[in-house]
Amino acid sequence: MRSHPVIALACLLVSGCCNCPRPTQAIHPNPKETLDDVVSAINVNNQKIPTLWSSLYYKADIHDDKGRSHTVFGEGVLLYRAPMGMRLVGQKEFVGTVFEIGSTETEYWLEIKPELNTLWVGRYADLAHVDIDRLPIPIRPDLVLSVLGISTINTNLTALPAPTMRYNNEQDVYMFVWIDKGPDRWVAQKEIWYDRQTKQPRRVLLYDSNGRNVLRADLSMPTKVQLEGTPQNQWPTMPGDYKLFFPDSGSRLEFTLTEPKLNNGSEVRIQPPDMEGTDAKVIQIGAGGGV
């Protein structure tokens, strides 16, 4: 009696096949680049982007202090000025601005208008007076600034926080971990995965002083940044798509850039909202704010 092929296949699956070939992860050969080589390549690209302007599409799922979810989506704009100037604005048709995430060299802020109608604002100098690992804010602007992927790396590789590098043969990425000295131990501050071939960041992980993840970001879609008067083959590259997750609050922020270019500073100034002129609930973080 001839066995049916379907039955034979089922029996084979049940009994198992020790000799069947198994799919394996591609193992890339070790590259010969040094830490200095990789840092130099990243900096050559990123130093061409001291400022940035880009329109964007966004989706944000923001969790308040009671665990309730507030989801918004639409179009917006991103402004950046090295090293710490940033303004990310989300807008909604027929509504206007629905949220704003911002930072200057001295201040940071988050404003959410629909439903929450709350403005969080603080000064970087005051962070010494609060538990920075547990700031009462659903999306931390300083962390968003850290994942843009266009900052340069200090070429003094022993200056703290200092980068360490290892190569991942399976993912074909250079994995950088920045370490700093705490009061009683060394701590991992942040981790960035750079694609070996493009030197573009693919993943960013930020940690608190106890090694807990406070932000995870997946970056993709390398995008050219327009430089007027420069041949296109010399334009720098940066990630075009960002997916951010904040484990402490459960909030998520996703945005995709559209035709980024250098910002000459004339479009919009980067400055915090007027706390006296707003009808939003204002939460001040740090010294004087009591939070």
Image: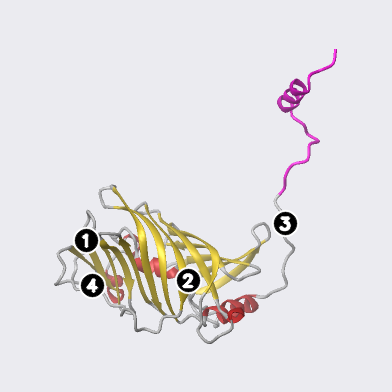
Measured Cα–Cα span from mark 1 to mark 2:
31 Å
Nearer-the-camera pick, 196 or 78? 78
Q: Which mark is residue 259?
A: 2
The image position of residue 34, as x and y in percent, is 67, 75
Of pointers 3 and 4, the one earlier in the residue sequence: 3
Residue 288 sits above or below residue 263 on the image: above
Question: Looking at the image, can residue 183 be seen?
Answer: no
Which residue does the image show at 71% across and 25% down from the upper left?
A: 14
Q: What is the magenta range?
A: 1-24
- Three-letter residue code for mark 1: Thr
Residue plotted at (50% across, 66% down): 240
Of label 3 and label 2, which has the lower sequence position?
3
Amino acid on which disc 4 is placed:
Pro
Task: Look at the image and tell me in which quarter the C terminus lies.
Answer: bottom left
Image marks 2 and 4: residues in contact by CB distance under 8 Å: no
Residue linked to disc 1:
118
Residue 67 drawn at (x, y percent): 29, 47
